[in-house]
Image (cartoon, grey):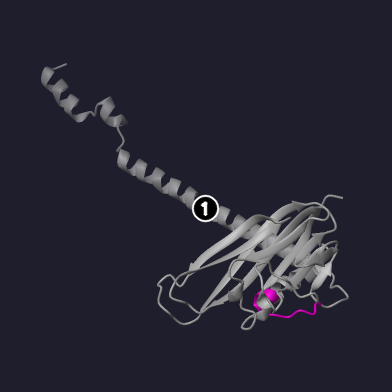
Amino acid sequence: MDPGLQQALTRVAPSQDTAMQVPAGPVASHLGTTSRGYFYFTTTALALCLVFAVATIMMLVVQKTDSIPNPPGKVPLKGGNCSEDISCILEKAPFKKSWAYLQVSKHINKSKLSWNKDGIVHGVRYQDGNLVIQFPGWYVIICQLQFLVRCPEHSVDLKLELLINKDVKKQTLVTVCESGAQTKNIYQNLSQFLLEHLQVNTTISVKVDKFQYVDTNTFPLENVLSIFLYSSSD
């Protein structure tokens, strides 16, 4: 073949490498779009499954709560929101073997608190400021106290202690009136929670360092000690 003609045909015909090359931009863009689409779809599906699961759990909880029968007796103690919530929970709870709900006595003259004897006590004995366990097992213990402090010229430490057989098991400490200047009244709430395995004749009591600041007038029904048997060992 004539060398000139062969050179012309070579210029016109594309090489094999040129024919096989495909721009990477469009393909990469397409793959990226597809990946994002799958990601959005998977995320949406998981979110819907989560919402469905939460809704199912809430329905089961509501059904279980509604299925708890109301006891024949009514709780005589009525207080603020917290007191009503605690007493309501204890009244409707499925545990009935051992529980108590007591309000602090108005006449406090020592660090170890005493409680009104007309409180709710079931399967527990109350004696000299102590709750005495009658059934062994795991008990939930809750105490809440309200304090009213008229600030002196120094700071005041308020401490709440939960005692098991005269041993401190849990305590809460807060300092008020730290400025050192006399200010208006300070209202302070202290609460403590304890889960403890207790044997028969174990005693539960509460101590406060500055018992004179326990407010039995403003919120008399918000100073409470409550326990219930969570899991029996019998």
Note whether 114 is above or below 18 in the view shown.
below
Q: Quadrant of residue 57?
A: bottom right
Residue 94 in sight from this viewpoint: no
- The amino acid type of the residue labelled 1 equals Thr
Q: Residue 73: give x, y in percent of width and height.
A: 86, 76
Residue found farthest to the left: 4
Is residue 150 shown left or right of residue 23?
right
Note whether 216 is above or below 41 in the view shown.
below
State which region is magenta. Answer: 75-83
Residue 205 in sight from this viewpoint: yes
Q: Name the residue at 43% across, 75% down.
A: 153
Q: Main secondary structure of the magenta part?
A: loop
Q: Name the residue at 73% across, 80% down.
A: 78
Is residue 6 shown left or right of residue 170?
left
Q: Which residue is mark 1?
A: 43
Q: Quadrant of residue 22?
A: top left
- 79 is within the stretch colored magenta: yes
Give the SS element for disc 1.
helix
Query: Which quarter of the figure is the N terminus placed in?
Result: top left
Which residue is more in the foreground, 230 or 206? 206
